[in-house]
Amino acid sequence: MRVDVVSIFPEYFAPLDLSLIGRARAGGHLQLAVHDLRTWTHDVHRTVDDTPYGGGPGMVMRPEPWGEALDALAPPEADPPRLLVPTPAGAPLTQALAHELAAEPHLLFACGRYEGIDQRVLEHAASRMPVTEVSLGDYVLFGGEVAVLVILEAVTRLLPGVLGNVGSLDEESHAHGLLEAPMYTKPAAWRGQEVPAVLRSGDHGKIARWRRDEALVRTVARRPDMVAALAPECLDRQDRATLEQAGFPAAPSDVAK
Ligand code: JF8
């Protein structure tokens, strides 16, 4: 997969040389290029921002450098990339979106700063390529850079050949719409706490059932929204019994009415 990133802080992306993403790059799974938006300015101050029309606090990113950057990185004659624009107003990043992005041949990330990018940049880009505004969640960051680091980490680990053990992808949290059961390693007893006996029993059927029940109980307690979103046909009799015992669905509260 090819990935281009445009930012006024290209140094933010230094961590992408490290660890498993660095290895994915060295192994040729990820071809990453980070570009300084100021490359596409022409004034002595290399200006990228200006005051907002309509007034209000802060500054807005001017459209001209972004227009030139997108012309250079997504030339009209070439196969268009998918443009991703982090913004608190975007669609939430989910594991499903990460899978979708991992199947793309070319991603182009536009990192805004200040109060964001002039909306006409996105409107114009949408006439040439698919544009997706994406959000990490309901809290406010200074800019899109950290969001791009997060999205790239979620996507890179899904690229074929990047994870050694492909099976671990199907077993992890969110793969089945549930949180994972707790995990343990040696020693069997530590500071007076024992690893649950079932995990040391060697009975793989019992272990799978125990993990499924733990996952269900945990998800009811921590993420009832995820349990509510489960397709009923994904639940067997024992699942339904475990959910009921865990107190799902919660009794309707007076507040909700
Ligand atoms: C920004 C550009 C974001 N979940 C999120 N919170 N805040 C942001 C974000 C993204 C881009 C810019 N301010 C200026 C905030 C995402 N994604």
Image (spheres, rainbow, N blue to C red):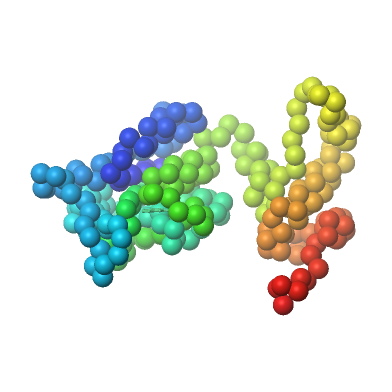
Q: Residue furthest front?
A: 57
Examine the rendering and report whether any part of residue 138 can be seen: yes
The residue positioned farthest toward the top in the image shown? 187
Nearest the viewer among 89 and 171 is: 89
Residue 125 to residue 211: above or below? below
Q: Quadrant of residue 171?
A: top right
**Where residue 173 sits in the image (x, y, percent)?**
66, 46
- Does 230 appear above or below 164? below
Image location (x, y in percent) of residue 142: 39, 49
Residue 67 relative to residue 157: left or right: left
Above or below, 233 relative to 31: below
Can I make out residue 78 in this image? no
**Where does residue 207 sit, x and y in percent of width and height?**
84, 39
Q: Residue at x 21, y 44 (%)?
A: 38
Question: Which image quadrant is residue 22 in?
Answer: top left
Depth order, front residue of 253/117: 253
* Quadrant containing the C terminus in the rendered view: bottom right
Q: Does 222 sit above or below residue 1?
A: below
Using the image as rendered, state which of residue 212 and residue 48 is in the foreground: 48
Give coordinates of residue 204: x percent, y percent.
84, 37
Q: Residue at image x 76%, y 74%?
A: 254
> Where does the N terminus fall, quadrant-wise?
top left
Viewer-closest of 247 and 214? 247
